[in-house]
Amino acid sequence: MTLMNRVKALHVEDMDVVVEPGIGWMELNEYLESYGLFFPLDPGPGATIGGMCATRCSGSLAVRYGTMRDNVISLKVVLADGEVMKTASRARKSAAGYDLTRLLIGSEGTLGVITEITLRLQKLPQSSVVAMCNFPTIKDAADVAIATMHSGIQVSRVELLDEVQIRAINLANDKKLPEIPTLMFEFVGTEAYAREQTQIVQKIASEHNGSDFVFAEDPEEKKELWKIRKEALWACFAMKPKCEAMITDVCVPLSHLAELISRSKQELDASPLTCTVIAHAGDGNFHVVVLFDPTKEEQRREAERLNHFMVHTALSMEGTCTGEHGVGTGKMKYLEKELGIENLRTMKRIKDALDPKNIMNPGKLIPPHICF
Amino acid sequence: MTLMNRVKALHVEDMDVVVEPGIGWMELNEYLESYGLFFPLDPGPGATIGGMCATRCSGSLAVRYGTMRDNVISLKVVLADGEVMKTASRARKSAAGYDLTRLLIGSEGTLGVITEITLRLQKLPQSSVVAMCNFPTIKDAADVAIATMHSGIQVSRVELLDEVQIRAINLANDKKLPEIPTLMFEFVGTEAYAREQTQIVQKIASEHNGSDFVFAEDPEEKKELWKIRKEALWACFAMKPKCEAMITDVCVPLSHLAELISRSKQELDASPLTCTVIAHAGDGNFHVVVLFDPTKEEQRREAERLNHFMVHTALSMEGTCTGEHGVGTGKMKYLEKELGIENLRTMKRIKDALDPKNIMNPGKLIPPHICF
């Protein structure tokens, strides 16, 4: 769908935009900037709005603005029988019928092809504060992220990076950030509000062995910092150029995050592979990048073992095997444990009803053994 | 389901709660108060969480916290074949499979019986400011609500009431509020933040012929004001005790709200029936209470005519026939115009797949003529 990449209509007064699926979120935000608006999701660079719908994607801003689930008003979809369906009106809320918009978001192409998307937009904030803070242990950092959420503060970003990830960033970007567990924060709003929220979180951090906040002051510095964070995966490859990455993407109820990270970190530190930790900590969403040499079978097996370990630990904590990356084929094997067979049978019934010939991205998302 | 009304588990640290469907949102909030938490939806008094899920309900706080769609983590549902399905894990976000939670929310009992709900909770705000402001015309009031949204301010409530609704409130509550178009605002957050937001909106109101803000100062006064607003429908009946009410519930993209309200108001003022206007103006959601004597057929017909007029006007503005009340049987006739036949056929396919014997709330939501 990458050639369908136009903005079809911008409704500034309604704060929504109608786009084709191939447009990237970064290009869209460049287009919107002069109108004082933005689309508040920021997955990896290069992600397209259509792909983001298909995988129910999110990113570091989800803690403040929600995921794709929360930011799509309506879709146009080509169904398996060739009919073109509109999922909803352009009203911001509606109780008119089944929520087909949400059914399509996260369906990974298995129910239809998304050809048009109407997105909710947000006003560009007047002011933002970006700050970093270091911690002696990764558990301290996770505890601060959790305490921040409990305080009722509206952070727009709270990202956790471990010392290995910081080392990778330093190497790739010629930086000298302290190589210990780190939280990156962003607060947005009016100037006074962003400042007030920052002070509250500074206090929380100091109560959990946090260092002083280091602030990014000018707009270029702020932009560079988030760019570095966004490109964290590329930094990992720069550190181990011959490696591939196995990336976990688990998400747990907030109270379990610190324990999940601590248990995972123990396992990762004991492994011969190089592993980095990055978490969207305010959502309970946790990634590990496991770097392995694809020519060495035992390294691939070890990467898979670590991935299994973290998924099963998350599932034992009432979490999910995928917070934002989707199922595809790799995560199908975890769905029954997470959701139960009744859920999978219901998915299969819906899939069969809407795509009886199984022509829409066959073999994805629904485990092959499901029948009824 | 009203006898299934227990709180099954409260997870304070995760800021979620597991409840049975029969519990009311007001009872739930009484239970949560001592934990410093609340569930941020406020439909009519007496609504239950299960019913609110079934109709994808919202209320005056939706402008800040979203609708039921945005505040449910997971459901337990008894399906048509008797199987019990969990729709999702307890993680706050997930990309694991079809969004069956959202499919059930708003399905009005036609796909299954909801027996357990896990809800996202919010921290009770530190501080709130409640204020009222009057306007010479209803269009001025609507314009201020819209301009407030465009300013990027996070109001927690912005409710619009016309002079007839205010008169009903005065009569029923022995009040002396000025009987002209009125906006009721609420701003929440830290004290400084709530005050700052209030000042910004005061400025917007003064630019649109608004009166000075009248503030509700003490907590009891604030509570009473929202109670009066919540009971606005009962105030209408107090004004016309022998009447029934026909209530519209349309919702349009924000830029159309002022025009929709103005055009409706013209039609209502010309009608022999007594009609009051209440809008959740920040969402573009607009209710009219049309009071009619049920023993007089011509009055019922006139009420229906007014309702049709407003629904069709909203649909001509890319709006929805129901913002929050649901479809039932009364709104089925509008769905095809709003959503198109392809959407209705898709709904019917899903309904047939999940409830082949049509035993789940038959005859509701999906128009009877839909086939494929």
Image (tube, coloured by chain):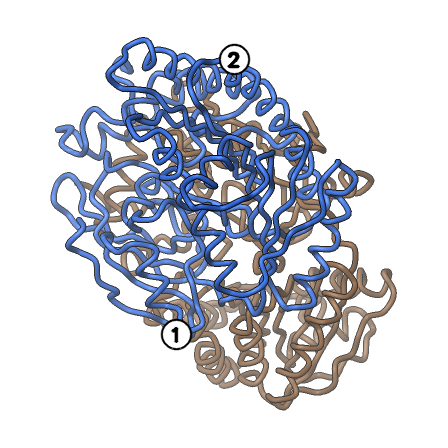
Chain colours: A brown, B blue
The CA distance from mark 2 to mark 1 is: 50 Å
Which of disc 1 and disc 2 is earlier in sequence?
1
Asked if one can make out residue B314 in the rendered structure from this viewpoint, the answer is yes
User: How many residues crowd around disc 1 within 10 Å: few (fewer than 14), some, or many (20 or more)?
Assistant: few
- The one nearer the camera, B320 or B311, is B311
- Please name the amino acid that badge 1 sits on: Ser
- Please name the amino acid that badge 2 sits on: Ala
Q: Position of residue B339 (x, y in %)?
A: 44, 21
**Left or right relative to B249: residue A146:** right
Residue at 52% across, 21% down: B314
- The one nearer the camera, A306 or B78, is B78
Q: Classify B55 as above or below B78.
A: above
State which quarter of the image contains the C terminus of chain A.
Answer: top left
Q: Position of residue A224 (x, y in %)?
A: 81, 63
- The one nearer the camera, A252 or B301, is B301
Query: Helix, strand or loop at disc 1?
Result: loop
Query: Helix, strand or loop at disc 2?
Result: loop
Residue at 58% across, 22% down: B260
In the picture of the structure, the residue carrying the numbered disc 2 is B270
Asked if one can make out residue A289 in the rendered structure from this viewpoint, the answer is no
Residue B34 is labelled as: 1
